[in-house]
Amino acid sequence: MHNLATWKEERLFNWLKSQSFYSDLVFAKGQMSRWDCYAPGKKHRIELKCRRKHYDDILIEKSKYDALIAEANKHGDVPVYINSTPKGVYCFDLRKHDGFWELRRMPKTTEFSERQFIVKEVGYLNIKDAFMLKVS
């Protein structure tokens, strides 16, 4: 059994690549890319996130969403947001989600040592709207 609460994006990438659905998965070429990986066979341009806690509503930053949508549109790809939580791996087709934005005061980074807060524009994707991948 996998402890999904300890996963980082590279582990999620490797697990996804080991599944027949994404066996052709490759990392984005640029380290500063606004997306993490690409599945050429399905034309899925993918952003990965690993969450230590489970939430039914999964956060996405609007700037990440906008960049992923723009890049996918430029190449005729499907923009996909994949999140792992302790309860599973959830895949969202971002073409089906828009118009759910709000401003929230949040930590600038996820690093616990840096507690600087800024206002971010964010939205929430409910897991009931996701395709769930079983992890065993």
Image (spheres, grey):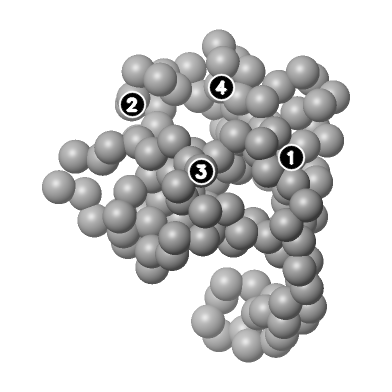
Q: Relative to 110, is 127 above or below?
A: above
Task: Residue type at mark 4: give it.
Answer: Ala
Contact (Cβ within 8 Å) of mark 2 with mark 3: no
Which residue corresponds to mark 3? 129
Contact (Cβ within 8 Å) of mark 1 with mark 3: no
Q: Residue furthest top?
A: 41
Q: Residues within 10 Å of mark 1 (few under 14, many from 20)?
A: many
Earlier-in-chain disc, 1 versus 3: 1
Which residue corresponds to mark 2? 18
Task: Residue type at mark 3: give it.
Answer: Asp
Q: How crowded is mark 2: few (under 14 residues within 10 Å), some or many (20 or more)?
A: few
Q: Which residue lies furthest to the left in this view?
A: 1
Quadrant housing residue 27: top right
Mark carried by residue 39: 4
Task: Residue type at mark 1: give it.
Answer: Leu
Give the spatial CA distance, label 4 vs label 2.
13 Å
Determine the secondary structure under disc 3. helix
Q: Which mark is in front, 2 or 3?
A: 3
Mark carried by residue 113: none
Give the spatial CA distance, label 1 vs label 3.
19 Å
Quick check: 44 left or right of 67? left
Give x and y (percent) for residue 110: 57, 72
Give the spatial CA distance, label 1 vs label 4.
14 Å
Q: How many numbered marks does the figure carry?
A: 4
Mark carried by residue 68: 1
Q: Residues within 10 Å of mark 3 (few under 14, many from 20)?
A: some
